[in-house]
């Protein structure tokens, strides 16, 4: 099983700054099958990015994804108040589907 | 617009079977080439994939749960279900169903597939084992 390790665990930032979230895989992931989700308290996760770098429908362009192989990144170019949440990466390059443990982006 | 709604008991006794259903509206569990997933989230923790069913009825499960989990579809009702046997307190979680959208198209004489991720989620249902 591919283990996804996200870092940092918590990111304390102010609105307007750039956020960079990392997702490292225990073995190579086909970039077509790397996804990012956002989750707010008490809510279901929301798909942000599919195929490493493609924004899902309705996702603002301040969210971008990049990476290949074992290292992937989600970048939020300028944090808006509604972006403070937990972010998960997920892979389906090989079964079973696995999620990272999450990065919490909190307001400084 | 596809919508999903989980339902089932909120309280299950230890050693018994957890049974949940996900009703699909605005779409079809038969839609090629989608996958229908169950994901759970223990209190204060991350997401754990439980298993999935594809449009043909083929299943795949998390190896850590494989001996206890079954996912089936009721196509006439346009819903899919999760059964988890011999539950313990460790199975206490919010359980989500989610559609994983997959599109197939021909390119260069071959069918290729694009996985658009888990783009539709239910609101989640809390199951407590106690």
Image: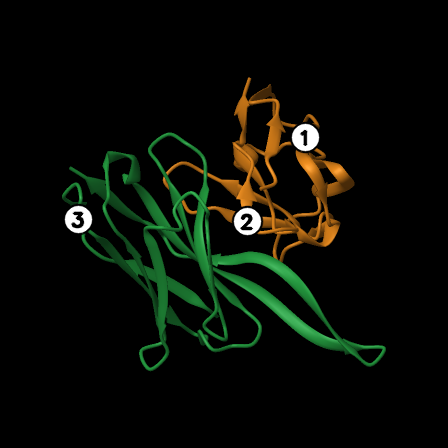
**What residue sits right under mark 3 in the picture?**
B16
Q: How crowded is mark 1: few (under 14 residues within 10 Å), some or many (20 or more)?
A: many
The residue positioned 38% from the left and 45% from the top of the image is B40
Q: Given the image, what chain letter belongs to the residue carrying mark 2? A: A
* Residue at mark 3 to residue at mark 1: CA–CA distance: 40 Å
Mark 2: few, some, or many residues within 10 Å (few <14, many ≥20)?
A: many
- Say whether disc 1 or disc 2 marks the residue closer to the N-terminus: 1
Does residue B121 appear to the left or right of A82 in the view shown? left
Residue A7: % across, % down:
62, 25
Tell me the crowding category of disc 3: few under 14, some 14 to 19, or many 20 or more residues within 10 angstroms, Cα based: few
Residue identified by numbered label 1: A22
Where, quadrant-wise, is the C terminus of chain B in this rendering? top left
Task: Residue A77 in the image: state x and y as whole percent.
Answer: 72, 34
Q: What element carries label 1?
A: strand
* Residue B102 pos. (x, y %): 61, 67
State which mark lies toward you, 2 or 3: 3
Determine the secondary structure under disc 3: loop
Q: For mark 2, give the secondary structure.
A: loop
Measured along the vertical axis of the image, is residue B92 above or below residue A51?
Answer: above
Figure chain in green = B
Chain letter for orange, please.
A
Q: Report the Cα–Cα distance between label 1 and label 2.
A: 18 Å
Residue drawn at x 58%, y 72% is B33
Residue under label 2, please give it: A97
- Same subunit under labels 3 and 1? no
Closer mark to the observer between disc 1 and disc 2:
2
Tell which tag, 3 or 1, sits nearer the viewer: 3
Residue B26 x %, y % = 43, 74
- The Cα atoms of the two marked residues, 2 and 3, are separated by 26 Å
Q: How is the image coloured?
A: by chain
């Amino acid at each position: 099983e591919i283990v996804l390790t996200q870092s940092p665990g918590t990111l304390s930032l102010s609105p307007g700054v750039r956020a960079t979230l990392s997702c490292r895989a225990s073995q190579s992931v086909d970039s077509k099958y790397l996804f990012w989700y956002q989750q707010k308290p008490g809510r279901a996760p929301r798909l942000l990015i599919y195929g490493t770098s493609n924004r899902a429908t309705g996702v603002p362009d301040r969210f971008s994804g990049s990476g290949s192989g074992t290292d992937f990144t989600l970048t939020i170019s300028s944090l808006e108040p509604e972006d403070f949440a937990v972010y998960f990466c997920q892979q389906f390059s090989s079964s079973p589907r696995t999620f990272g443990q999450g990065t919490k982006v909190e307001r400084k | 617009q596809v919508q999903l709604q989980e339902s089932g008991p909120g309280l299950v006794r230890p050693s018994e079977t957890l049974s949940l259903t996900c009703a699909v509206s605005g779409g079809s569990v038969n839609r090629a080439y989608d996958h229908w997933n169950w994901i759970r989230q223990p209190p204060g923790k991350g997401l754990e994939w439980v298993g999935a069913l594809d449009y043909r009825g083929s299943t795949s499960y998390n190896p850590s749960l494989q001996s206890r989990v079954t996912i089936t579809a009721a196509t006439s009702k346009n819903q899919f279900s999760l059964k988890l046997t011999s539950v313990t307190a460790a199975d206490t979680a919010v359980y989500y169903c989610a559609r994983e959208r997959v599109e197939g198209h021909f390119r260069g004489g071959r069918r290729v597939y694009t996985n658009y991720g888990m783009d539709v989620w239910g609101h989640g249902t809390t199951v407590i084992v106690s």
